[in-house]
Amino acid sequence: MNLASVYELRQGPRKIALAPGLALYSHWDPVLPGEKRLPELDRFFFTPVDPGPLPANDDDIAFATVTQLSRWIELKKITSERLTRIYLDRLEKFDPKLRCVITLTRELALAQAKKADAEIAAGRYRGPLHGVPWGTKDLLDTTGIPTTYGAEPFRNRIPSTDAAVVKRLHNAGAVLVAKLSMGALALNDIWFGGQTMNPWLLEEGSSGSSAGPGAAVAAGLVAFAIGSETEGSIVSPSMRCGITGLRPTFGRVPRTGAMTLCWSLDKLGPMARGVGDTMLVLHAISGPDPGDLSSVRSKLDFDASASVKGLRVGYFPAWLKDAAATDVDRNAVEVVRKAGMVPVEVSIPDWPYDSMNLILFAESAAAFEELTLSHGLDQLKMQVPDAWPNLFRQSRFLSAVDFVQTDRFRRSVAMEMARVFSSVDLLLVPSLRDEMLTITNFTGHPSLTLRAGFVEVSTARSDWAPDPAHPLPTFNPPRRVPHGVTLIGRLFDEGTLGRAGLALERPFGVAGERPPGW
């Protein structure tokens, strides 16, 4: 009886229909009161490169970067239709091994490619993405084409409009070849079609939840892809699959027409085979949209040829001494110094950063409340304790008081990050360091993950909790796999992030190595 009035308050919102696209009344603004929204200039300078001669081998063409492909198309060395057919054929050939494709968009792709070729022949070149084939994580709506969220209850869902990012890439002349796999409802790498695998090591998953984009880019099945991140879903598959992932500042790229997991955390960003590629894509998809109340008008100041000399790059000495750090992580600090940037030791308080996940769990459970209460979650393949079905059910018992206190703690963390960035321009961190992965997703800071070297693993890696009944494969001798590092930028300062990434990519000297057998 004592709780009856409380129960009535909980039931109130369920008495009316809350549309799926209805956002929270309050929203997270990563820029604290009194802070300037950087940068002050809005410019994008990407000097066209000499792509070299067009390779005779289709596989070599497929693994080229967007910057190379776009120049070959612009110079009429290759048609968009031929390039599109190369990728469509590779997607069909290799998907049985990788399970990275949910829907192949062959008909749309060939129509878009032929249109691109006709426009370019007529002198109407739209820019560096014109005629370039791409794929998207299957949470962006596409008109008349299934958008399934990788989850059984949505596998027949067909949207009637395109997501904002899809519209922008269509307007840029890019060619959509595939809707790529994602862990069901944006968790890890298992979807209704199975587990998406890592092209470098087929005995392990590609990581998630942008599993398909990670695998497809690494295996040369698309020129670039769009992934999403709530807490690690671009960074983690970029690491596992050895590609470059750019997670933009929260609010830079609109999420209109994208699956909502967490209103105050979700971000969309490019995944590609090079730093320059991700910047080209970011330039095309940036900017506000009325359908996403958290998207803001922002500037992008990027000059690929500008010097990085003197940029202050913060790093955490204690983290590099940790057993989880690798020689690749430690060597990256030296590469920073040799590139003319200045390494600066930084530190943050020993706070319980992982407690902020209460917000993630509460928002995601609210986003999929109807699916939870209707038992639609029961259809999902993964029902283990750390999968969404169980987490959504648990989250209905979280305390609203604790949510408010956690939200206040989140602001304290943002203020701490503002303090750190008052003395540095960038941070260099081990990519999967839990503290920074959690912190920067909750504060909204942008990140750039790029391959920096190789390590050896003796056991397959997994996003899932260990299952004694199904142990992970072991390797003797150990297997060689790519390893990356992550740069964290100031809010809305992706231009500096991209310049520093280009300056490191060259001396790392490993971006061009391909996984064997593809």
Image (spheres, rainbow, N blue to C red):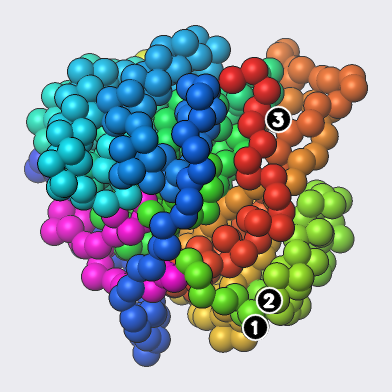
Q: Which segment is the magenta one?
A: 281-303
Residue 316 position, x and y percent, is 75, 69
- Of mark 1 and mark 2, the one earlier in the sequence is 1
Q: Nearer the viewer, residue 322 or 415?
A: 322
Question: Pointer 3: what residue?
Answer: 461
Q: Which secondary structure lies at badge 3?
A: loop
Residue type at mark 3: give it.
Answer: Arg
- Asked if residue 9 shows in the view, the reply is no
Side of 261 where 244 appears, left or right: right
Among the 4 quarters of the image, the one containing residue 517: top right
> Alpha carbon of mark 1 to alpha carbon of mark 3: how far?
38 Å
Residue 396 position, x and y percent, is 39, 42
Q: Nearer the viewer, residue 416 or 424?
A: 424
> Alpha carbon of mark 2 to alpha carbon of mark 3: how far?
33 Å
Question: Pointer 2: what residue?
Answer: 341
Magenta span contains residue 293: yes
Question: Pointer 1: what residue?
Answer: 310
Label 1 packing within 10 angstroms: few (<14), some (14-19), many (20+): few
- Quadrant where the C terminus is found in the figure: top right
Residue found at the far bottom of this picture: 34
